[in-house]
Amino acid sequence: MLNRKQIAQEIRKGKQLEVHLPMLLNYISSDYYAYSGMSFAMHYYNVYEMLVSSECSEGAKDFILRVNDIVVDTMFADFDATKREQGIKKLHELRGEIISIMQGLTSYADSFSLYEYMLNRIEPNYKDDLEDIDVEAEVKELVSMIFAKEDRLEINEHIRNMLSQLPVRMTKNRFYDMLNECLSIYEGSEESTVEDFIYMLRSASGLYKPKRMEEDFPDLMKAIKSLESADYQSLNEADYKELEKVISDATSLLKLETESYYALEEAVNALYSVLLNGVYASTEAIATGNLLKGIVEEIALLLQKKEFISIPDDLVDKFAVAEGKLEHYLECLTEDEAMIDLVKKDHKKLAEAIMVEQQLECLILSQSLVSNSLFIDLEKQWNGKIADKSYIEQRWSELVDEFGKVLSEGNKLMNRARIAATLREMPVLFRDSTEVRDYMRNSLAGCRDVAERVASVSLLKQLLD
């Protein structure tokens, strides 16, 4: 009998696929179950400990209890296909709710960053010893810091930091031209790639506003409205400190909410993968995936009783049995991904014919759930179309209209904050250090606000240091 490696080689060669394909998929399902089972226990313990230590938001707490109901129904009873399907459906819906909430939190984070940008540039006005900078000397020093190393990726990151911090002194038309240049780079790419890039620009600039933001987080919206209503042109020191506290308090709340839902999503994704692959996994893989099941059972029992106390040390010590195993299976999954992609690309019709299509779909979902893209949309379907010139021009025109509306309504400081945040997300368009130097010189020399100029240089140096 062929071993696993030989089976994979035979599939790559296209030999005896009817025999080898089901065998390979079972091996891969076993890997996903073993990895996800141990991973779920660890993530669920992490979520539970956050709850015990009051480092979990009230909203996330309700989600934890809902997840626990699914755990009890699907993991601690005799196998029931109907309960498995119901559990997967509930997890899918719950996961969608979490993603929606995280989109709202991300939007809040971007908005608070814009207001922080504004306040940072006002702050030096309240210092008695405010002194202007020597533009030429500062530009020389900043250029040397940006190009201190030869690593192109690091240099580009430094340049993006520069664009995000130095005074924005460009016309709207110049900004729109830069948007056009950046979007043009994506001509010939898939439309999905263009849309992902546009989403990043809209999110960073505060244009993207998901639904239910105010309903889900009224306290954060209250903070935004306080910041929106302030008069930044005539802000005195007391008003400044009050707004600074608004941002500080909101950021602390935002951190609590974000960390809670992030940890929860890690557990949900792992449990989702467990339920998808349990029916296909080998006995050995199930035993490995269940090594930490005693910990999950204890947590589930405490959550049912709503007794939020730490689990016993002797159970925590059992995490040691998973040492090395999680890393081993993660390496296996890296190899498995290539085989899933191969089967999906070349043998999907055969999978249908030999009735392993459902298992393949479970693996494709598991591949996404275990990926680094924690909040990946499992339902998002792209048509695979290529973005031609007309598509790029249309999306650019729509983006310009959207920016045009908010920039016409905003004050100067907010407009500069939006543009700076957008520039931070763009591909680097400078060809050499001379162009970077010229941009910095024009930016600093063109800024008539001493406080803004001083603050911008100071903040940039902190990022480059």
Image: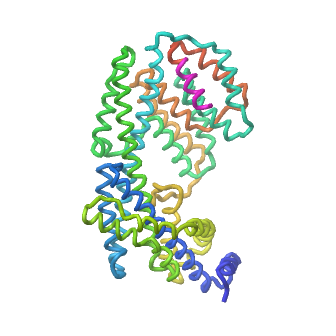
Q: Report the quarter where the N terminus lies.
A: bottom right
| Residue in the image at 29% along x and 61% along y | 65
435 lies left or right of 281:
right
Q: Residue 268: x percent and y percent?
A: 41, 62
214 lies left or right of 450:
left
Near-viewer residue (301 or 411) = 301
Q: Residue 14: x percent and y percent?
A: 68, 79
| Residue in the image at 33% along x and 67% along y | 300
Q: Is residue 464 magenta?
A: yes
Q: Is residue 362 magenta?
A: no
Instruction: Give the extent of the magenta segment.
Output: 454-465
Q: Residue 121: x percent and y percent?
A: 48, 21
Near-viewer residue (360 or 23) = 23
How is the rendered protein coloured? rainbow
Residue at the far front in the pictured view: 314
- Residue 365 seen by the camera: no
Position above or below: 2 against 285: below
Near-viewer residue (16 or 50) = 50
Position above or below: 328 against 118: below
Q: Quadrant of residue 295?
A: bottom left
| Residue in the image at 55% along x and 73% along y | 31
Near-viewer residue (392 or 136) = 136
Q: Quadrant of residue 156?
A: top right
Q: Report the quarter where the C terminus lies.
A: top right
Q: Residue 297: x percent and y percent?
A: 36, 71
60 lies left or right of 158:
left
342 lies left or right of 60:
right
Residue at the far bottom in the pictured view: 1
Position above or below: 426 against 55: above
